[in-house]
Amino acid sequence: MSYKSLLTATGEVAHRWRPTTKQLITGACLVFCLTYLILSVNQDRDRWDAARRRLGKDDRHDRTSFWSSFVDRPRGTPPPAHLNDTRLRLLSQKEAYSAGLQGSGGDNTTVAVDFFVMSKCPDAIFCENYLHRVLETLRPIARTRFHYIARFESPDDPASPVRCMHGPDECKGNVQQLCVADRYGADKAYDFIYCQNHAVRRIGTERLAASCAKSLGMGYMPELTDCVKHDGDDLLRRSIHFSQESEVSQSCTVYVDQKLRCIYESGSWQTCPGGHAEDDFVRTICDAYRGDPEQYPAACKKP
């Protein structure tokens, strides 16, 4: 076929094929969606790089900052060895802070389940949602406590501004969750967190906080708004300080009965003595319970 014949045939095909209005609209929609997706990915990458530069990669004054635990450490690398066999250091001066996060019971027989998290961290959200099912069945014997991982802009000055890994909204989400625990107890806080986790992008917004509070029968105004405004910053700073004093920098880290139980990081369970299946967590908590065996929830009773 000659070049002239090829051009003629191509022109005839183009002349005969006339797209319908529906095809044109469909094509335009596809182009728009692809363009939006590409721009979103680039924007998220820019935000990640900016956060990386701001919170750790360029921080020459704090080379051991918590950020390096998430960015610089290769995936699958075991956590610091000192976490493996040590007990959570719940010092006596921290008991006043912890008392507000006791959850149900609050006595010495209930089993403490401590979460070290960030409110918008994907690993923390998976970990919290996964264990929510477990702890719902064990609430009579377990008390949950949430501690937040962030950093102070100046490591040597706890009064300096707080920086959260996933941005300002994460700091706001941390404060909202701490205020629910402070005003309503950790059981309600866990349910509140579970509600927020179903709208990850909106964590930290007042609208989501108000919606979750209402769905759980809590008053967002003025109870929680008052806490956020007047007490939230202090609660967050004490929580961050507690996490730092406990030498925990990975979200999500879980302690049961003041012993390291599991870490969920980079999309997988790591350092989980005793396993990470739901039944494994149930067994750990039930075995740690020191109260009346007759009060065991059904999940603890062996067939």
Image: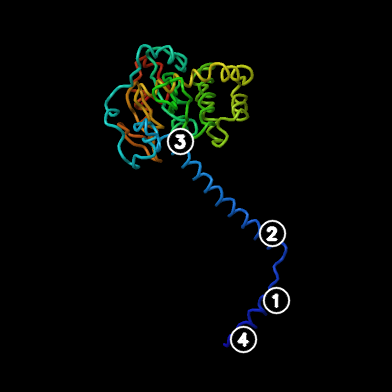
Q: Which residue is mark 4?
A: 4
Q: What is the number of the mark on residue 87? A: none
Q: Residue 271, position in %: x, y?
A: 31, 34
4 vs 1, front mark: 4
Mark 3 or mark 4: whose residue is earlier in sequence = 4
Secondary structure of residue under mark 3: helix
Secondary structure of residue under mark 4: helix
Q: Which residue is mark 2?
A: 25
Mark 2 or mark 1: whose residue is earlier in sequence = 1
Front residue of 238/65: it is 65
Q: Of the residues shown, which amino acid type is indicated by label 2?
A: Ile
Mark 4: few/some/many CA within 10 Å (<14, 14-19, 20+): few
Q: How many marks?
A: 4
Q: Of the residues shown, which amino acid type is indicated by label 4?
A: Lys
**Real-space Cα separation, disc 3 to disc 2, in angstroms:** 43 Å
Q: Residue 182, position in %: x, y?
A: 51, 17
Mark 2 or mark 4: whose residue is earlier in sequence = 4
Residue occupying image coordinates x 56% and y 20%: 228
Q: Quadrant of the C terminus?
A: top left
Mark 3: few/some/many CA within 10 Å (<14, 14-19, 20+): some
Mark 1 or mark 3: whose residue is earlier in sequence = 1
Q: Which residue is mark 1?
A: 15
Residue 233 visible, this orientation: yes
Residue occupying image coordinates x 45% and y 21%: 139
Q: Which residue is mark 3?
A: 54
Mark 2: few/some/many CA within 10 Å (<14, 14-19, 20+): few
3 vs 2, front mark: 3
**Real-space Cα separation, disc 4 to disc 1, in angstroms:** 17 Å
Mark 4 or mark 1: whose residue is earlier in sequence = 4
2 vs 4, front mark: 4
Q: Is residue 192 left or right of residue 8?
A: left
